[in-house]
Amino acid sequence: MYIKKQFLLCCFLVAGFAPRADDGYRLWLRYDKISSTTLLNKYKTAIQFPFVYGQSATTDIIKDELNNGLSGLLGKNITSNKTTAANATLLCGTPIHSKEIKALYNELSLINAGDEGFVIWTQFINGKKRIVIAANTDIGVLYGVFHFLRLLQTHQPIENLNIISVPKLKLRMLNHWDNLNRTVERGYAGFSLWDWHKLPGYIDKRYIDYARANVSVGINAVALTNVNANATVLTKPYLEKVKALADVFRPYGIKVFLTARFSAPIEIGKLSTADPLNDSVKNWWNEKVKEIYSFIPDFGGFVVKANSEGQPGPQNYNRTHADGANMMANAVAPFKGIIIWRAFVYSNENPEDRHKQAYNEFVPLDGKFSNNVMVQVKNGAIDFMPREPFHPLFGAMPKTPLMMEFQVTQEYLGQATNLVYLAPLFKEVLQSDTYYKSKGSTVAKIIDGSLDNHTLNGMTGVANIGNDINWCGHPFAQANWYALGRLAWNYELSSEQIADEWLRMTFTNNSSFLATASKLMLQSRDIMVQYSNPIGLHHIMGSGHHYGPAPWVNNLNRPDWNPVYYHKADSIGIGFKRTVTGSNAIAQYLPEARKLWEDINTCEEKNLLWFHHVTWNYTMKSGRSLWDELCWQYYTGAERVQQMQQTWSGLKQFTDKERFEQVKMLLKIQYEEAIWWRNA
Amino acid sequence: MYIKKQFLLCCFLVAGFAPRADDGYRLWLRYDKISSTTLLNKYKTAIQFPFVYGQSATTDIIKDELNNGLSGLLGKNITSNKTTAANATLLCGTPIHSKEIKALYNELSLINAGDEGFVIWTQFINGKKRIVIAANTDIGVLYGVFHFLRLLQTHQPIENLNIISVPKLKLRMLNHWDNLNRTVERGYAGFSLWDWHKLPGYIDKRYIDYARANVSVGINAVALTNVNANATVLTKPYLEKVKALADVFRPYGIKVFLTARFSAPIEIGKLSTADPLNDSVKNWWNEKVKEIYSFIPDFGGFVVKANSEGQPGPQNYNRTHADGANMMANAVAPFKGIIIWRAFVYSNENPEDRHKQAYNEFVPLDGKFSNNVMVQVKNGAIDFMPREPFHPLFGAMPKTPLMMEFQVTQEYLGQATNLVYLAPLFKEVLQSDTYYKSKGSTVAKIIDGSLDNHTLNGMTGVANIGNDINWCGHPFAQANWYALGRLAWNYELSSEQIADEWLRMTFTNNSSFLATASKLMLQSRDIMVQYSNPIGLHHIMGSGHHYGPAPWVNNLNRPDWNPVYYHKADSIGIGFKRTVTGSNAIAQYLPEARKLWEDINTCEEKNLLWFHHVTWNYTMKSGRSLWDELCWQYYTGAERVQQMQQTWSGLKQFTDKERFEQVKMLLKIQYEEAIWWRNA
């Protein structure tokens, strides 16, 4: 197998050169030489001799990353373990492989670090200092090393370190909606990274750099394939390919999941049914799972979309989601696998309000799922809108671990061409109060399982990664991959902090740049909402592309696929009445959570048309009528995109020409799209 | 529009560093610092002050390329026009923009350089020297500059230059079989470069680097779209996108062509017919062409695949290929456009020998095509086989300019995973003697039009380029793009010279490396033939993939789609009898050309089973029976791939780790495939 060690050597010698072309391939792991001489000298003195304990594929990775990262950042060749551990100024390891670190176990509070957490600590010995990066596992050390490199990349002081960092969620995941023909559903950055034709024989260097990027932000699980699943991936030739990827990802602490097509026993197993209570079906899955684990002993499990948008599922056999999930859970249980069952369900009948369906189907099943099943819930009840109240399932299924599903790919947020920083959206949802146990029962606390002592917990993002050279299409879309990982590790990080980190690592530590670019990012999602779906409007996109506006679309097969279904515009007003006199979807929220929304006078204007049908002449807080306010929002949104263009132009001196021009062209397109939304 | 100037700055400062990671993106335009100090100093002294005359988009490109190339190669910052022309040591320009060059017009023999040729000449003035790169057009100068940079990249002496280079063919083209959904028919390097969704607003840097690579090898035309055409590309929104690409390519001297779907007047024009003699149809094409030229004033014209493999064409209306081609030719004539009509035709009936069809259909039309029509002929009569006698149309249509169609993408030559250098295949065809006017009427002389004084002439290659980071999937596949361009410019270059140039520019000038790697390349096509289609066998590939062997396939709809149709194996022998007692396809060649082939005793063994059905116990020159010889060839071919693996392993010290590992993995796959062929 092919592990590339020299990835970063190309560039560190050119540091000091005024901003040079950057194709974006390196993401936030650029490791260019520290630009401040004072800081550089401090770092050089402090770091000098790194030593890494242990002998494993993971410790090899730690050494490579340290050598490359430090050599780049410090502008001189640095090689780990050139000195003894006793002389090291930077000591990395676990208590298992290092007596020194074992001796410091209590001082380092390693008991609190768990399997994945780490400690970074400045040790004072006889007036000398050394930095210790310690963890209970090699993977923990790897996380620590990336954190330490980030401190340098972001120009933080390292004189007196005392950091302990433990992930708040166990499963920090990416869902790739990648098809076996390499198209990506809702992918806007080229095509799938997974080159199935050349696998397993050819290991693309991107697989390794993808793993590096993931572990650097804390991601530890990936579902390789689309939730609209193809059973072929479960056949032997494909399992050999999946194994090759799992082998690459394993030393980075990343587990592989696959999506399972519920009807696979029929399609590739030649059975006549996929009924989850049928013995042949159970047996087929048991044997298939055994086969998978023979290739991938640490296989994560299945992600399943069933009985939704035409996908087969247990309801085809009059069984429940729990019947289906438990049958699969039973198959993977002996191998410690789990089943992630998606709650995003659309029945084929026409529901009175799509908002209500997942809740109606899943709440009655609470307590009926096996203990190795998680139910994966989208952040909102409709579908990854630019703004959406939190999903009412959060706080409504106490006996079931709920996994958060965010969408990193910008299906409804301008796709590849719009600069929209998603951390504020993620944070808005995570901080929403469900009032499940009391005030402060935020969505974040539901998904971390702490309120009900769940042992399984996690967060996933639908990936925005493709084979474009810069991975995500838009240079700023990389920030959303970054933010998903960072928030899954620690949802208490602020959007500001994440943007600041990412900008420093991806562009420059220049403070003028940071002040301006950070503002650009932090406002961007609000601006997108403003020019596309203001005041709680939703799903007014064109149906084929989910990209631009098409509020006039009214010719689709199902009422709830039509934009007019959602904005309910008529001669009197606009908005979807979900209060007690409407669909009453609002009743799915706990009384405290919904209190403000229920009354048109207390409902925040940002959610107004989500819950209420409002007359065109309704007076908004601004004093404008609803109609005028809508116009004002659309116009202001478009104007603000123009301001984004100007702001970016002012940052030219700080950025390399290549990415500067890319973002400039994209903002121009974004402005044209904002005008398109406005005029629609 | 976005022209990136800093593309190459990243890397030149790291020269001197032992072979470092290279992702292959830079192709043969790497411009790393000259490794020999002696040579470096000579070059530095000689070049010092470049000066470029002229003020156009093309001269801007010339300056950028010179600055980047020289700065990289010489390891110091070099900027053109920092001195006056009088003090310049390297002077570039045209007689139009430079009095000095005008004054040298005769001495430089610029009269012989034509529109695209160039002169590179060492001028001696008062005991001092300066290098002059001159041409009659800016584009000519650009070609000259790339040639000059190649001299440095390949470590050639520049003390006393006296080079005049003029392309032997006017149209030096790539045909992209790229679909609008970005899949590529027979593309094995990812997906289409053309990101139609983001065009025209977003100009991917790859478009510029693609243009640079093309002009560096002399390519001056591209057909953007698949010959299995989609009429949508002719609609206004797409023409705006095509215009954006044409605008990028224009200053590089590259003209854009599109493929025209013959039934476009029905599909996007809402006509009821596409009959080429129908006035509404003619008028539709006239108007459509006018519209195209309003976007792209120098649009090249159309490439058309008609009445072949289910594509619509004039025969649907009982018209001839000439009727169809001339109708379109008439539409583009006022704008100096041309029509390139493909001769690759398969009728829907089952022909007795597919080999004969193109000849039978096209020879009677010789003289009936308008003078702005070219007929594009594949190199052989079947279909881009690993080895194939030249197409009998060459030399059989004296009144029609024939364009050569080679396949750079390795549809039948191992696709993305096999190292097969195609220059020997191209050369074998170009040097084949048609005996059209006399001995020496090679295919090359047919296509350059010299034997019949055609004003149009050209060569195209079906591109092997995709959005993989290294453009072509296999690092060595880049050599085939390079070779196609170089041979289209000058078909007299040898395979050896082209391999040597490419290796020096793409890997290293180290002589040990070159001796070994060059041999590896030059043998590779013979080896491929040996383990896949030896002794004139052909088309025994699996039908869906065209990739690996499937000689047993006998279940397709048409006999000529079945491998057994081509190898005709039975209890007595194997081979396709095309002599007078067989299909008599051989009669399509002129008597002198076919003489040796006709007699089983004089036919070269490499073409034996192409023309003859040979008994299994037939004694070959080796003394082995045919059966034993076949086995021997397959075994030897596979063994030789193993030797290729060993050879490559020995080159580790000379190559960067990244490409070394890539090629190593791919050769392993190639070996497994050779075994697969052998066992089949």
Image: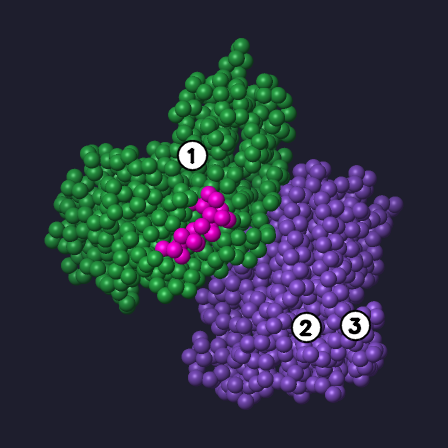
Chain colours: A purple, B green
Q: Which residue is at the far left? A: B581
> Which residue is painted at 76% across and 69% down in the image?
A628
What residue do we see at 47% from left, 18% from top? B104
Residue A432 drawn at (x, y percent): 78, 73
Q: Give the main secondary structure of the magenta stretch.
A: helix
Specify whether disc 1 shares its chain with disc 2.
no
Above or below: residue B503 compared with residue B295:
above
* SS assignment at label 2: loop
Chain letter behind tag 2: A
Q: Looking at the image, is B57 positioned above or below residue B110?
A: below
Q: Quadrant of residue A297?
A: bottom right
Cα separation between marks 1 and 3: 75 Å
Asked if labels 1 and 3 share a chain, the reply is: no
Q: Secondary structure at mark 3?
A: loop
| Range shown magenta | B282-300
* Residue type at numbered disc 1: Asp
Tell whether A388 sits left or right of B222: right
Q: Is residue A497 above or below residue A35?
A: below
Task: Identify the chain of the residue marked 3, using the numbered disc in the image.
Answer: A
| Vertical arrangement, residue A310 with respect to residue B370, above or below | below
The residue under label 1 is: B500
Q: Are marks 3 and 2 on the same chain?
A: yes
Q: Which residue is mark 3?
A: A625
Q: Quadrant of residue A655?
A: top right
User: How far apart are labels 3 and 2 at the CA level?
Assistant: 20 Å
- A246 or B337: which is nearer to us? B337
Q: Earlier in the sequence, mark 3 or mark 2?
A: 2
Q: Mark 1 packing: few (<14 Cα in 10 Å), some, or many (20+)?
A: many
Give the residue type at disc 2: His
Chain that bears disc 1: B
Q: Which amino acid, by three-letter code, is at mark 3?
A: Ser
